[in-house]
Amino acid sequence: MPTKLSRREFIRLCAGSAAAISMSPFLAPFMAEAAEAGAPPVIWIQGAGCTGCSISLLNTVHPSIQEVLLKVISLRYHPNVMAAAGDLAIREAMYKVAEENPGKFFLVVEGAVPTGADGLYCTVGEENGEPITFVKLLNDIGSKAKAILSFGTCAAYGGIPATPPNPTDCKPVSEVIKNVPIVNVPGCPPHPDWMVGTIAHIILYGDYPELDEFGRPKMFFSKIIHDNCQRRQYFDNAIFAKNFGDPGCMLELGCKGPIAHCDATTRLWNGGVNWCVKCGGVCIGCTEPQFPGWPIYERMPEMPVGPAMTATVDQLGMILGGAAVLGIGGHLAGNILTGRIGGKKDAKEGEE
Amino acid sequence: MAQKVVVDPVTRIEGHLKIEVEIDGGKVVDARTSGTMFRGMELIMQGRDPRDSSQIMQRICGVCPVSHGTAASLALDDAFGIEAPDNGRIIRNLILGSNYIQSHILHFFHLAALDYVKGPDVPPFVPRYQADYRLPDAVNKQAVDNYIKALDMRRKAQEMLAIWGGKMPHQQGIVVGGATEQPDTQKIVEFKWRLAELIDFIDNVYVPTVKAVAEAYSDWFDIGRGCMNLLAYGGMPLEQGKDHVKKEKFFPSGTYIRREYRPFDPSLVAEEVKYSWYKDDTGGKKPTEAVVTPDPKKEGAYSWLKAPRYNGIVMEVGPLARMWIKKVKEVTDLGEKAFSVMGRHFARAIECSLVAHAMDEWVLQLEPGKPVATPYEIPGEAYGMGLTEAPRGALGHWHHIKHQRTAVYNAVVPTTWNASPRDGLNQRGPMEQALIDTPVADPNNPVEPVRVVRSFDPCFGCAIHLMTPDKKTLAEFVID
């Protein structure tokens, strides 16, 4: 690899300092250098989604979207960006690229995979007068990819379209494609740095960043919103906002910060302008596998965790359904007994 | 000998669209537009806490989520019997207006322009259709440079939005009763500073680029006429008042039917499903009561879009409709040439400038220290209607709450109007009508039909209708 950037340094750049507003501008030259050896072909397909992940990607600051498109990757197929349409797009920019570069291109999937009604709830093109369903396309192209990047909560975990009663039988990508490495970059939408940073890591080191149990890169998804929230002091002092626009912890208004993993509190959104709770909104837990399986503007219920002890809000994920949440809940409950969640480790990372 | 040409997918739009045109004598003689993705967002809302709609419904579309957040919150306000205070009203307008700027710039430079401008010879700009790229080299080069500059500009418009909305896409700052962010001098200055840069770009780059393209492609003022009936629900309220139709708004509500202006009456909106993949028992229902069952293998159907009609009439919505109904001189001066591919692009650019200049004044009307949201209580049972204008046109959400839960949710969205299939009277939708008579030089490179389609700035994430399959309706939520 041409780069002189160690993984450790890279992760530090990506994870950012306490005032990160984007990935470091230092990164762009390394990525361009790595791509000189041949920018990897990327095919980006959209299923049951809303294009929000693509729009978020366009908001990347360092490197800029211009640099990403012209220097870092070779984006062969993207429904919103590419010049071609129709057969020309499907044939030349997708199937041909996949056939000529088996195991050498990356597939980005945005949106969940509708499997109901033989896949007819989402068709993405035609072949000999027959519709190509999204689930077929994913199988055709995904099986040839070097790796699949599931961008956004819909592709990673099913997200909104897969919420009960799941009218179109949507599945996450990982339930459809089994034989190809998959990296989940959830979020509704994901922060552009999470997407670009994941791509950067793969290009620079030729392998995948360290993932957590839900397939998310740890460098972006190991922190808990509640622990790093600027409003945390209000929570510790039991000052809770009762109406929108009030000062105070947003817990009573439905904040899911205690169960949500991501670094928005320090990374901030849209070039460092703001983030969900800072603007007086609530964290809706959009990076979690269970999103949106909870009432967004309802307070999380309290629950006992053991003899002579009432849990703080830190374990409230437990009753919000799903074994996965239980995992988080257990992890949180354990942390209650041993001190603040991620206390020492996260604090160190934050001091970089 | 007629020839059938299918373009599937139509790229550089939001969502999944297929168009099928029949060409005879070098012209389109028949057209069908098909929305090809369906999620059933409404079912997902059913039985939930009604307040979730301002977040869940935003996810209909990542390009124009604010419009859905706005319409959903207005419907909740209406159902809860409350109104946003002035600060909340203004912040909602600033968030929505910022997204207009983002969406319009994105649409022209990144979605539509490549039909007229030759991009560099690298992916994703190649492969491309062979077409009559007419811009002189110098102008073309300028346009490509502006494509790059416009990427930065639309990003800045999203930053400007996030000052009030927290993040974008899918902002968090619009809620039932108003907004969440407290205005202060710093935020107002930050907003104005970014807006000034955008106004400069819109007035000195965006509008002139549209004019340069329109000059080179002046025959496109005569192509893509459409139905010539226009509809605006109205949006961006400028005063308090619970009667949406009557109160003063930046975009007035109204209709223009058979060359006559008439007031808008929300009770005349209904949707048909004769050519849509839904069971036939639901044609012509009001949005408050629409209950449909998907039928993806229905004979004769060709779209996931329903066919909304106003008193049975086919209507076009969007910037052209808004500018025409607001009687903006630059647009009305075009006369009937406004009803065209270039007319739509021009109206969108003019609108972008108007919204930007208006926001420059609105932001100064914010009063730090005053409330941004009105407290509320969730009613046991209520109906709410939220009408607004999305970048792509008239948007309405209808929300029926029962037992403090969502019983029925329905949205009639801009692209459902514009890209609708035929209705029970076999009237083609606006985009299908606009495609008729479009000249096609080379059926193997059907650039002309996609130029017509893209002039509407379609968005199919929104358009594929929310619905309620009756077999999955919970008994307690069946409509009385």
Image (cartoon, rainbow, N blue to C red):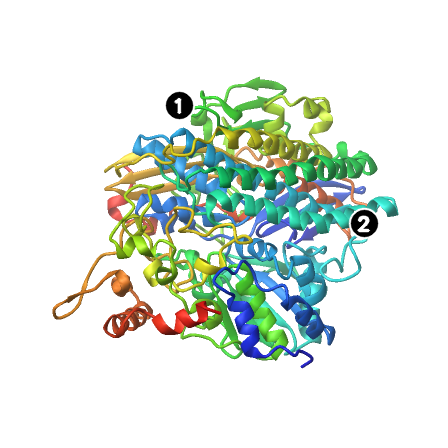
Q: Secondary structure at mark 1?
A: loop
Q: Earlier in the sequence, mark 2 or mark 1?
A: 1
In screen coordinates, is A31 left or right of A9? Answer: right
The kind of residue tagged 2 is: Asp
Task: Give the quadrant of residue B112.
Answer: top right
Task: Give the quadrant of residue A64.
Answer: bottom right
Quickly name the residue at label 1: B241
Q: Would residue B291 be seen by someone viewing this image from the given angle? A: yes
Q: Does B171 appear above or below B79? A: below
Q: Looking at this view, is A349 or B451 the one in front?
A: A349
**Gap in angstroms between the C-alphas marked 2 and 1:** 54 Å
Q: Would residue B286 be seen by someone viewing this image from the given angle? A: no
Q: Position of residue A166 (x, y in %)?
A: 39, 58
Give the residue at x 56% y 69%. A13
How dense is the environment of label 2, judged by Cα within 10 Å: few (below 14), some, or many (20 and up)?
A: few
Task: Give the quadrant of residue B220.
Answer: top right
Q: Residue furthest bottom?
A: A1
Question: Which quadrant would the N terminus of chain A be assigned to in this image?
Answer: bottom right
Mark 2 against mark 1, which lies toward the viewer? 1
Q: Chain of mark 2?
A: B
Query: Same chain for the residues at labels 2 and 1, yes or no?
Result: yes
Q: Position of residue A155 (x, y in %)?
A: 49, 64
Q: Position of residue A136 (x, y in %)?
A: 55, 67
Q: Does B19 appear above or below A146? A: above
The kind of residue tagged 1 is: Gly
How dense is the environment of label 1, judged by Cα within 10 Å: few (below 14), some, or many (20 and up)?
A: few
Quickly name the residue at label 2: B442
